[in-house]
C-alpha cells in the first residue's frame, strides 16, 4: 500500500503553528471515529496540495523524501515564502501508517506496494486533490486507507471568530432582556 491516510481541504488558520517554547502541531481525527484522540501528523511523509480561497490548486509538493522537511515544516515554510499570501487550505496524502497508540509508524515500515495499488493511489490522489468535474466516482484508496478530519486546538488557538460573534450577540440579547431567538 502506498497512501496510508489523508486529509482533505484542511484550513490553514486552524493549524497551531506554535509559539516560542511551544511546538506547533498538525492534528486530525479519523473521519470514522471523530471522538478518538487526535493524531499529530507533523512528521508525516507524502505529498500535499495548497489551495487558494476559491479552492483552486496553486501548488503541489512533497514532504519527507531524503533530507526534506516533514509535512508540518514544509507547510510552515509556505507561510513565509512567496506563496504565503496565496493559500488558505491544503490537502495531504501520507505514506506512514498510524499505530494503535496514535503515533506514526517508523519511516522504514513501508513495504513495496503492488503496481495496481500504486496506480489506484495515484489516481485517487489526483481525483481527491483536483476534484475534476467529469470524474463521477471517487478515488480508490481501498478500505485500509483512512481519512482524517482536521482537529482545531481551541486551547492553543482560542475560539473561532464566528463563535465569539455568536457569544457576543447572545450576551447583548440577554442584557437587553429580549431573549435569544
Image (cartoon, rainbow, N blue to C red):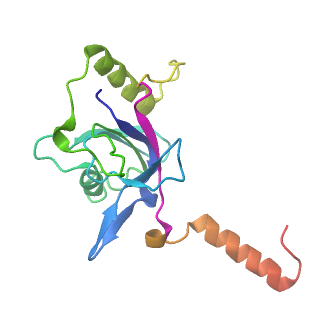
Relative to 4, say whether 21 is above or below: below
Q: Position of residue 30 (x, y in %)?
A: 47, 45
Quadrant (top left, top right, bottom left, bottom right) of the C terminus: bottom right
Expressed as whole percent of the image width and height from the top left, the position of residue 54 reads 50, 43
Q: Is residue 123 above or below residue 171?
A: above
Measured as percent of width and height from the top left, residue 82 is found at 26, 53
Q: Report the label total.
A: 0
Which residue is drawn at the image coordinates 27% and 60% (left, top)?
80
**Residue 103 or 25: which is nearer the viewer?**
103
Quarter of the figure that contains the N terminus: top left
Q: Residue sitting at 37 percent across and 29 percent down?
A: 125
Residue at (29, 48) in percent of width and height: 104
Residue 118 position in % (x across, y down): 29, 21
In the image, residue 116 above or below residue 45: above
Relative vertical location of residue 139 with respect to residue 29 in this rendering, above or below: above
Does the segment drawn in magenta span residue 24? no
List the single residue furthest toward the front: 100
Q: Residue furthest top?
A: 116
Report which quarter residue 114 is drawn in.
top left
Which of the two residues, 70 or 74, is positioned nearer the viewer here? 70
Q: Who is closer to the viewer here, 79 or 180? A: 180
Residue lying farthest to the bottom in this orientation: 175
Residue at 43% in and 26% down? 127
User: Magenta part of the protein: which range?
Assistant: 142-154
Amino acid at each position: 500500500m502506498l497512501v496510508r491516510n489523508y486529509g482533505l481541504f484542511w484550513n490553514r488558520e486552524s493549524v497551531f503553528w506554535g509559539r516560542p517554547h511551544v511546538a506547533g502541531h498538525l492534528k486530525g481525527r479519523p473521519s470514522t471515529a471523530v471522538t478518538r484522540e487526535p493524531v499529530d501528523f507533523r512528521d508525516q511523509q507524502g505529498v500535499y496540495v495548497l489551495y487558494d480561497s476559491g479552492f483552486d490548486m496553486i501548488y503541489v509538493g512533497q514532504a519527507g523524501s531524503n533530507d526534506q522537511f516533514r509535512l508540518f515544516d514544509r507547510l510552515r515554510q509556505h507561510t513565509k515564502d512567496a506563496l504565503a499570501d496565496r493559500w488558505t487550505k491544503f490537502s495531504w496524502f501520507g505514506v506512514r501508517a498510524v499505530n494503535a497508540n496514535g503515533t506514526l509508524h517508523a519511516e522504514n515500515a513501508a513495504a513495496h506496494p503492488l503496481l495496481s495499488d500504486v496506480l489506484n493511489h495515484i489516481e485517487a490522489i489526483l481525483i481527491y486533490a483536483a476534484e475534476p468535474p467529469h470524474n463521477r466516482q471517487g478515488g480508490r484508496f481501498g478500505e485500509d486507507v483512512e481519512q482524517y478530519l482536521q482537529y482545531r486546538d481551541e486551547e492553543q488557538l482560542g475560539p473561532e471568530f464566528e463563535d465569539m460573534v455568536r457569544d457576543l450577540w447572545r450576551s447583548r440579547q440577554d442584557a437587553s432582556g429580549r431573549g435569544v431567538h
